[in-house]
C-alpha cells in the first residue's frame, strides 16, 4: 500500500534533523493509537487564530485525539474565528509596524496576534453577548460549569450559527462539542472571555465568581479522567508549544502517583513536543524530554520526540500523516 500524497512527500523529503523527527513522531503517534492508546493534546500559543482547526477538527472527528488541554485564548479564539472570520485583518508586514501604526489598529478595535488582527466587535463582543446569557441562566438555577462547557452550550444551542463565517467543519471547538471531548483549561482568567466574566462580576451584573469552575477543579477532572483511562489504555502526550497548557496537564501523573499514592499508575506512554523554545537553563518549555523522567512523568522506554520548529507548519503535517493523507 502506497502512502497518500502528503505522507509520501514527507517520507521522501523529510529525512534528517527536525524533518526526520516529524516523520518518526507521526509514525509513533499512529503506532500508539494502533496499539489501543489514547492521545492527549495540549495547545499553547495562538494556534486557533493560526486556524489549526482546519486539521485539528478532523483529527477529533476521526478519533485521533481523546482529550485536550488548552489556554483560554485557544478555547475562545477558535469560536471568534468561526463567527468573525471575514472581519479579520491580516498584516503581512507586521514586523515593520511603528508604535503609531499599532495604536491605529487599537483605535480601530483590531487586536493583533502576529500577522492577524482579531476584530473586537464582531468576534469578542458577539461571543460575550451569548455567553453572558448562559452565565446568568446558570447563576439563576444554581448551576456551575467549566469554561469549555459554557462554550459547548452556546455552540449546541445554535445561537451563533447565523454568524458563522467559515465552514463549521474547520472549527475544532464545533468538532469537540459534537464529540463531547474532555477539555481542560488552566488559567482561563488569562483570556478575553475570562477577563469579561470577572468584569461582569465586579460590575454586579453577575453575583458570583463561582458560577464558572476554576483551575484546581480542572485538575480534579483531569486526574479522574487520567485514572479512568490510563489503566486500560496507555495515554500519550502531544504538546504544541509550551506554557501552562502543557505544564499544568503533564503534572497530573506525579500528583496521582506521589501525592495520592496511586499504585502501579501508568506514566505518559508517548511524548512529543513541537516548540521553538530551545533548550536553555531553567526553561521548562525548552526542557528535553528525559528531564521529565526525573519528575515521574515519563518512563525510560517512553517514545520521546522534540521538534524545534514552528507548530503552525509542523502540526498540520503530522496530523496529515496520522490521518493517512
Image (spheres, rainbow, N blue to C red):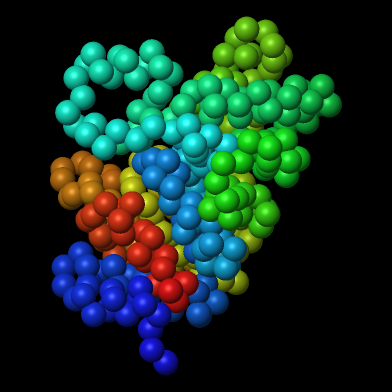
Q: Is residue 294 visible?
A: no
Q: Position of residue 286 (x, y in %)?
A: 24, 48
Which residue is painted at 55% across and 77% down in the image?
A: 36
Furthest toward the front, the residue is 86
Q: Is residue 200 above or below residue 245?
A: above
Quadrant in which the N terminus is drawn: bottom left
Quadrant in which the C terminus is drawn: bottom left
Furthest toward the bottom, the residue is 1
Q: Position of residue 182 (x, y in %)?
A: 61, 52
Q: Is residue 1 above or below residue 57?
A: below
From the viewer's perspective, tell me whether residue 277 is left or right of residue 64. left
Q: Position of residue 257 (x, y in %)?
A: 49, 56
Which residue is painted at 43% across and 51% down in the image?
A: 52
How many labels were placed on the picture?
A: 0
Front-most of residues 262 and 74: 74
Q: Position of residue 174 (x, y in %)?
A: 62, 49
Q: Which image quarter: residue 50?
A: top left
Front-most of residues 104 and 218: 104
From the viewer's perspective, tell me whether residue 270 is left or right of residue 155. left
Which residue is painted at 58% across and 55% down in the image?
A: 169
Q: Is residue 123 visible?
A: yes
Q: Is residue 44 above or below residue 169?
A: above
From the viewer's perspective, tell me whether residue 9 is left or right of residue 80. left
Front-most of residues 154 and 264: 154
Furthest toward the right, the residue is 141
Front-most of residues 289 and 27: 27
Q: Which image quarter: residue 263?
A: bottom right
Which residue is painted at 66% across and 50% down in the image?
A: 177
Amino acid at each position: 500500500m502506497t502512502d497518500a500524497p502528503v505522507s509520501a512527500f514527507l517520507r521522501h523529503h523529510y529525512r534528517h534533523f527536525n524533518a526526520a523527527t516529524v516523520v518518526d513522531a507521526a509514525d509513533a503517534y499512529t503506532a500508539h493509537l494502533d496499539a489501543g492508546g489514547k492521545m492527549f493534546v495540549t495547545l499553547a500559543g495562538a494556534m486557533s487564530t493560526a486556524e489549526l482547526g482546519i486539521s485539528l477538527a478532523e483529527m477529533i472527528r476521526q478519533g485521533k485525539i481523546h482529550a485536550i488541554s488548552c489556554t483560554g485564548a485557544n478555547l475562545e479564539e477558535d469560536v471568534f474565528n468561526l463567527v468573525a472570520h471575514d472581519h479579520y485583518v491580516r498584516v503581512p508586514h507586521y514586523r515593520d509596524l511603528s508604535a503609531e501604526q499599532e495604536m491605529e489598529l487599537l483605535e480601530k478595535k483590531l487586536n493583533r496576534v502576529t500577522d492577524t488582527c482579531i476584530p473586537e466587535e464582531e468576534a469578542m463582543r458577539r461571543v460575550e453577548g451569548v455567553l453572558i446569557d448562559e452565565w446568568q441562566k446558570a447563576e439563576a438555577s444554581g448551576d456551575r460549569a467549566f469554561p469549555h462547557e459554557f462554550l459547548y452550550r452556546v455552540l449546541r444551542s445554535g445561537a451563533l450559527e447565523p454568524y458563522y463565517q467559515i465552514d463549521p467543519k474547520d472549527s475544532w471547538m464545533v468538532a469537540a462539542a459534537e464529540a463531547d471531548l474532555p477539555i481542560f483549561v488552566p488559567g482561563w482568567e488569562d483570556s478575553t472571555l475570562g477577563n469579561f466574566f470577572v468584569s461582569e462580576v465586579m460590575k454586579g451584573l453577575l453575583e458570583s465568581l463561582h458560577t464558572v469552575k476554576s483551575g484546581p477543579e480542572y485538575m480534579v477532572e483531569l486526574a479522574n479522567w487520567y485514572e479512568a483511562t490510563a489503566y486500560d489504555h496507555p495515554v500519550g502526550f502531544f504538546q504544541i508549544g509550551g506554557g501552562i497548557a502543557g505544564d499544568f496537564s503533564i503534572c497530573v501523573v506525579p500528583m496521582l502517583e506521589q501525592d495520592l499514592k496511586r499504585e502501579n499508575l501508568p506514566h505518559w506512554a508517548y511524548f512529543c513536543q513541537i516548540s521553538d523554545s530551545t533548550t536553555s537553563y531553567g526553561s521548562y518549555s525548552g526542557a528535553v524530554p528525559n528531564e521529565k523522567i526525573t519528575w515521574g512523568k515519563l518512563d525510560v522506554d517512553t517514545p520521546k520526540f522534540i521538534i524545534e520548529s514552528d507548530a503552525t507548519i509542523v502540526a498540520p503535517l503530522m496530523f496529515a500523516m496520522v490521518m493517512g493523507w
